[in-house]
């Protein structure tokens, strides 16, 4: 029978008491100099905990940051094309929800620029840059809400009628497929990096997909039943959601 030998004076005690613990530590990769984590578990984070957590910068962390930057560059290119085509379709159809969705692409592109800025150069390891990026992404949510609310109110009051747009359907349908993939990836990477800014950009991608679905449904209802009030109602709902997500991003709750 193996003896249980107590560690002698000055001899370090094994972290986990088994080879599993050693393997776990080895798999983490070498740490890059940076602030230590505060020990907040992702599954239990509430009240902005993740936004204030400062993780150890391992090689895996740096790889994730490079992936985030690449995804944000791709998002920026996509949003530029999506916004231009969506705006053209919305103006042609006279659709407030389609125009608002296209302008939302511009705002999401701004969030992508902020995240690219946050993970470029020395800012990659900067907690101050993360805090500034978090606030910037939150403000980008707030920029969209007033326009949507005012235009929707005007359309409800005047009885403005929108028309069906084939281009609008094509553009929104493509975003309905792509945006959930990008959004979920960024939310997951945001938790891994403890980056509220990244998770907030992911939330905007998911909002874009929901907006696309709402616009498609609204255009279809107007075309089939002539219910013109649906379009501005969608605009009001999207404005409310933008405010809700902006407040969450400002408080640092997006990564939890």
Image (cartoon, helix red, strand yellow):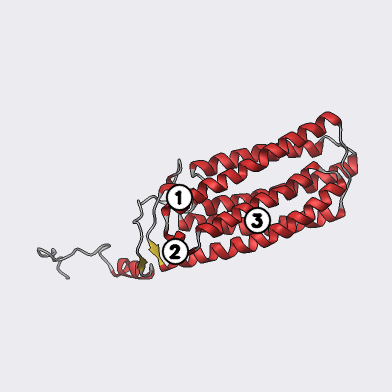
Give how far across and how far down residue 58 sits, in percent. Answer: 39, 65
Of callouts 2 and 1, the N-terminal one: 1
The residue carrying mark 3 is 180
Q: Check residue 43 in the rendering and tell me which mark sits there, or answer none.
A: 1
Q: Residue at x 48, y 67 (%)?
A: 63
Q: Check residue 61 in the rendering and tell me which mark sits there, or answer none.
A: 2
Q: CA distance from mark 2 to mark 3?
A: 23 Å
Of callouts 2 and 3, the N-terminal one: 2
Which one is closest to the eye, mark 2 or mark 3? 2
Of callouts 3 and 1, the N-terminal one: 1
Q: Tell me if 195 is positioned left or right of 167 in this view.
A: left
At numbered mark 1, what does the secondary structure look like: helix, strand or loop? helix
Give how far across and how far down residue 222 sits, in percent. Answer: 87, 41
Q: CA distance from mark 2 to mark 1?
A: 18 Å
Q: Which residue occupies the extreme left position in the image?
A: 9
Give how far across and how far down residue 185 sits, in percent. Answer: 57, 59
Figure disc tally: 3
Q: Tell me if 251 is positioned left or right of 70 in this view.
A: left
Question: Based on the displayed image, in which of its 4 quarters is residue 177 positioned?
Answer: bottom right
Q: Residue at x 34, y 56 (%)?
A: 36
In the picture shown, does residue 21 fall above or below 129? below
Q: Please state, as top left, top right, bottom left or bottom right, where the N terminus lies in the image.
A: bottom left
């Amino acid at each position: 029978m193996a003896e249980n030998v107590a560690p002698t004076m000055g001899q370090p005690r094994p972290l986990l008491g088994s080879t599993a613990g050693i393997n776990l530590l080895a798999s983490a990769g070498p740490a890059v100099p940076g602030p230590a984590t505060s020990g907040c578990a992702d599954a239990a984070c509430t009240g902005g905990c993740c936004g204030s957590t400062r993780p150890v910068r391992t090689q895996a962390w740096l790889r994730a940051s490079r992936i985030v930057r690449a995804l944000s560059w791709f998002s920026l290119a996509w949003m530029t094309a999506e916004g231009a085509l969506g705006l053209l379709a919305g103006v042609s159809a006279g659709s407030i929800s389609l125009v608002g969705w296209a302008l939302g692409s511009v705002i999401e592109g701004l969030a992508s620029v902020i995240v690219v800025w946050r993970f470029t150069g020395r800012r990659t390891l900067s907690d101050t840059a993360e805090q500034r990026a978090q606030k910037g992404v939150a403000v980008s949510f707030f920029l969209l809400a007033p326009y949507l609310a005012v235009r929707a109110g005007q359309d409800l009051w005047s009885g403005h009628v929108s028309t069906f747009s084939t281009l609008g359907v094509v553009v929104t349908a493509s975003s309905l497929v792509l945006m959930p993939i990008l959004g979920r990836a960024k939310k997951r990477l945001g938790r891994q990096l403890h980056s509220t800014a990244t998770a907030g950009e992911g939330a905007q991608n998911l909002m874009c997909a929901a907006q696309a679905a709402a616009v498609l449904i609204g255009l279809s209802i107007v075309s089939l039943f002539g219910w013109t009030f649906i379009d501005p109602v969608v605009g009001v709902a999207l404005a409310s959601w933008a405010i809700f997500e902006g407040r969450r991003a400002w408080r640092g709750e997006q990564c939890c």
